Image (cartoon, rainbow, N blue to C red):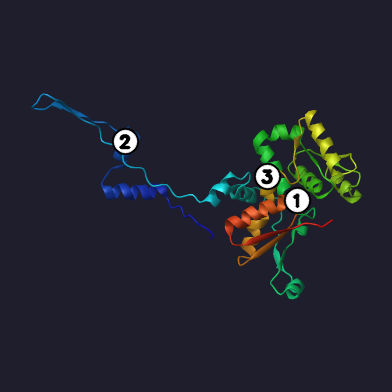
Amino acid sequence: MIRCLLLSSAPRAAARCRKWQGVTSQHAARRIVAPQELRAFSGVADDGEEIVDAPPSPPPEAPKRKTSQRDTYLEELPVTFSDISRANVAIRTGVKRTPCIKSFFLSELIGANVFLKTEFQQFTGSFKERGARNAILALLREHGEEYMRKNGVIAASAGNHALALAYHGKDLNVPVTVVMPVVAPLAKVDKCKKFGANIIIHGAHIGEAKEHAEELILSSGLEYVNGYDDPPIIAGAGTIGIEIIEDVPCVDVVVVPVGGAGLIAGIGCAVKTLKPDVKVYGVEPYF
């Protein structure tokens, strides 16, 4: 269920309320700002006992809205739907909004309506651009443009995350350093160089490349951007979930590929917030 809150003009609503009560605006403002006056009456009864009339008790508090266990759990997560909504607004000028296209052959084969989210249409060819751009924008807000454009960001990646970070770093004028293992595809290494990224080839696999990148952080002012285990990255990926619900509002099941799980974390948060009954399945390779 999607809940919608419509906010009317507060000043006009308040003016109508004051007019109905027969109170002028100046008087109403004075009553709101001034502290509550506590009045007490004291006297002496016929039998000589002192009488004190205590100040009036404060009005009872309005009942609080009950919070479900699910709402509490969602609010405690490192990434919430609010983060995804902000990312959706922040990245829209630099990331393509890809369509959900119905696949005739897959639908016929499976016996259900199957839609494909065409993230390959992004400039660098993957969904990684959403998180990369959102992460750089978040660092610019946190540290300021001067600091980030002087120091830049660093990441360890064998391909798509490196490409996305290099491309959006160039677009946002933030220097990017990428540590890539020796097994990284040469085509992606060359493309990162064309975007102006500083490429360091180190390590037999991505784990060793990541360790080297973390060592470089200690000796420089670079900000590390994890390719999947990072709140802005997850929030950026979650914008896909918003678009899925907008384009296919009758969706019953969402199937997400799983690697580091940043994609499914974001999409799951967005989809389950907007349509809690939708099932989200993760699919990962079997070795």
C-alpha gap between disc 3 and disc 1: 12 Å
N-terminal label among 2 and 3: 2
Q: Which residue is mark 3?
A: 232
Residue at coordinates 77% horizontally, 57% vertically from top-left? 284
Counting residues from the start of the chain, the first of labels 2 and 1 encountered is 2
If the image is split into quadrants, where does the C terminus sit?
bottom right
Give amino acid for label 2: Arg
Compared to 224, does 67 lie above or below? below
Judge left or right: residue 44 versus residue 19: left
Residue 276 x/y as whole percent = 58, 59
> Which SS class for mark 3?
helix
| Distance between the alpha carbons at the discs numbered 2 and 3 | 45 Å
Label 3–label 1 contact, CB within 8 A: no
- The percent position of residue 248, horizontal first and vertical second, equals 64, 65
Of badges 2 and 3, the one in the foreground is 3
User: Residue furthest toward the top?
Assistant: 48
In the rendered image, which quarter is residue 104 located in? Answer: bottom right
Residue at numbered disc 1: 128
For this orientation, the residue located farthest to the left is 46
Q: Circle 2 sits in a helix, a strand or a loop, which is it?
A: helix
**Of labels 2 and 1, the one closer to you:** 1
Mark 2 sits on what residue? 30
